[in-house]
Image (cartoon, rainbow, N blue to C red):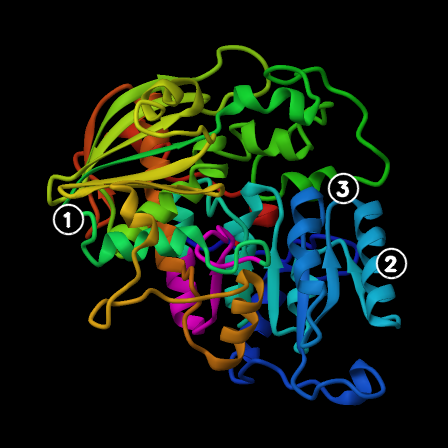
Amino acid sequence: MTPSFEDDTNNSTTGISRRSFVRRASLAGSVGFPTIVASSVMSADPPSDRINLAAFGVGLRGTQVNGAFARFPDARFVAVCDAYGSRREKAKKAWDTIYGGDFVKMYSNPFEVLERKDIDGVVITTSDHWHVPMAIAAAKAKKDMYVEKPLSIAMAWSLRLRQELKKSGGIFQYGTMQRSGTPRQPVPAFRTACELVRNGYIGDIQRMEVWCHDISQQFDSFKCRQWGSLRPEKAPGDLDMDLWCGPTEPKPYTADRCTEFGTYHCSDTGLGFIGGWGAHPLDIMQWGLDTDNTAPVYYEGGGTVPKFGLYKTVDTWDITCYYANGIPVRFFSERGCREIIMKYRKRYNGHGTTFFGTKGWISVDRGGIEANPASLLTTKLGPNDKPLYESADHQHNFIDCMRSRKPTICPLESAIRSDTITHMTNILVRTGRPFEYDPVKEQIVGADAETAKYWDRPMRKKWAV
């Protein structure tokens, strides 16, 4: 889609327009990054190379992710933008307390944040429909970016982001996190499983199974109405509903729309848990197969979409896709996976990835690894084996790469290619027809009008990038 910054429409009372944003961003391109911030700006005696960050989205997920960044002594939030005024204020108060001063400025206009030359990177943990538009704007402004999953609600948007990031030379980290270690799991099960697969310890790969949560498992957890209320209500006084809708068409506020759960499952703003949860096990499958530069070429199967209520994303699915070498992947949702995976696993987890090979299988999730033969669980890589990229902390891997200018553990290409499987699943379920996909041209073979309408989405002019 052609970038839409043609007019001088102001997006807030600040007077920052899309045209002025692009003009200034292009001038900023010669500045270079990351910025080295003077000690007088930061505090009495800070590190001279502290990185300045801006936070876009500080709801439930944003608070979790940004909290990880806020603990680092070599990075600092200096700006926060959210459609909820109360959330901006809460984040500012928390971070200023951590930093010991009045460092964080609040914004209601994301474009104004990106005008700041002292900001080196952005952390995008907004609702799903803002992920890529905000990332595209950040790339235009020459900012590095950490982008929460799922990547995009339209494949065409993701491909545009690739173009912009290539031009900017920026650093990108995808927030799938499972490729990195954690304090609780310093030797991550995911990296161990993928190293064993890549180095041939289960023989030649024959097939994979990938599964994750679906919407049915979340109603009680999020304490919301099943399938969501359609009844319009008065929005909270501190919510900028126009900004919240952003690049999507304006929708009325309801009790279940502007919630973390609502943004996942309203088809206006998300793809559902095929993306929100599927991003995790699909990413691990791609990593284990060394296919971060491609995607399956044929898709068949089906699923269901609710016929009533607010939530109309795909809520159950069972699809099979095939890589160019003929290896099949079964990707299915929680309501259909338990009986299948418990035929070979000892314990159940609502999401995971299993690799089946000629010499055995390995199944991995956040609870650990299961394998057959069991000896795989104690196998160590040999001197001629190739270890995978090692990251002890996902958020700090982004900070480290901002300095070194080396790729992160989850670069944009890995995000786009695993996200492709999500989008193809959505299209398959909604059209009810199998199809071929060309991962080189990155298009559905013989796409018709029905499939094309799920490939791209027009951005609302006021907030388009």
Q: From the viewer's perspective, is residue 216 above or below residue 358? A: above
Mark 1 or mark 3: whose residue is earlier in sequence: 1
Q: Give the percent coordinates (x, y) of residue 56.
A: 66, 55
Mark 1 or mark 2: whose residue is earlier in sequence: 2
Residue at position x 66%, y 20% from top? Answer: 220
**Whole-number angstrom distance, CA of label 2 to CA of label 3:** 20 Å
Q: Which circle, 1 or 2, is nearer the viewer?
A: 1
Q: Give the percent coordinates (x, y) of residue 191.
A: 38, 56
Q: In which quarter of the view is residue 342 placed? A: top left
Q: From the viewer's perspective, is residue 52 above or below residue 88? A: below
The residue under label 1 is 203
Q: Which circle, 1 or 3, is nearer the viewer?
A: 1
Residue at position x 61%, y 42% from top? Answer: 127
The residue under label 2 is 93
The residue under label 3 is 240
- Look at the image and give the residue range highlighted in magenta: 161-182
